[in-house]
Amino acid sequence: MAKFGRCEEIARSVPATARVLFLNAYTAMAYCNNAVLLPRTMIVEPHESDFARDLATSAFARWAPIAFIEAWLVRLPAWAAVLVFFAPATLLFPLKLGALWLFTRGHVAAGFALLMFGKILGTAVVARFYRILHPTLMTLRWFAYADTWFFHWRDRLYAFVRSLPAWQKTAAAVQRLRGRVSILVSALFAR
């Protein structure tokens, strides 16, 4: 929170109607050691700072019951870590069945919403479990091999896609657009 003085200085240049939102977001970023200007981080480059994900994850992990569970997960033996790592797929299966039931009853929007909720929840839980259990899981030879193999091929695929002319042209256009949006957003917060 050492950069809070800078927050107050910047906040004085923000219109009064936006000041509360600005101060809350900037204070949260400073608390998470990610103190950068609000318009650039929150609007223009969320993919680089992953501000929202990091803020939500750290806030969730500080909650006492979750911190206790995560400390317990770190101490699990390898075989139990594998069971925990693959458990979300099994535990979220009823949500998928519920979505299917909603689809068959003609509630397509509700079914789609439930399916998306399940997918997002499952992805978030598996990602958190991966981060917590990774050192334990890597002690298993088969998991270490599969992990290395997967990320090797993922990185090769990303490199191939990034080398395509269409990707490069699109990335350049996005960069130009980000620059323009950054200028517009900065002008909105200028005095």
Image: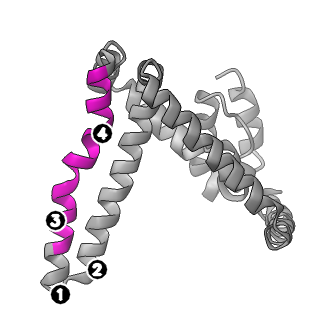
Front tag of 1 and 3:
3
Position of residue 93 in the picture relative to residue 68 (left or right): left
**Is 81 contained in the magenta span?**
yes
Residue 123, given in percent of the width and then of the height, sits at: 40, 49
Determine which residue is flagged by label 2: 109
Q: Amino acid at mark 1?
A: Gly
Q: Position of residue 169 (x, y in %)?
A: 86, 71
Mark 4 vs mark 3: which is more N-terminal?
A: 4
Residue 6 point in image, percent of width and height: 76, 32
Q: In the rendered structure, find residue 106 and report the number of the disc placed on it.
A: 1
Q: For the residues marked 1 and 3, what is the alpha-carbon distance in whole angstroms?
A: 14 Å
Q: Amino acid at mark 4?
A: Phe
Where does the magenta region start and end? Answer: 79-100
Which residue is tagged 4? 86
Residue at 74% x, 44% y is 37
Q: Which residue is painted at 26% across and 66% down in the image?
A: 114
Label 3 environment density (alpha carbons within 10 Å; few <14, some 14–19, many ≥20):
some
Quadrant assignment, res 31: top right
Residue under pointer 3: 97
Observer-nearest of 127 and 109: 127
Instruction: Categorize mark 4 by other alpha carbons within 10 Å: few (<14), some (14-19), many (20+).
Output: few
Q: Quadrant of the N terminus?
A: top right
As drawn, 13 above or below 75: below
The amino acid pointed to by label 3 is: Leu
> Any mark on residue 128, and which?
none
Circle 2 Cα neighbour tier, 10 Å, few/some/many (<14 / 14–19 / ≥20): few
Considering the image in quadrants, where does the C terminus appear?
Answer: bottom right
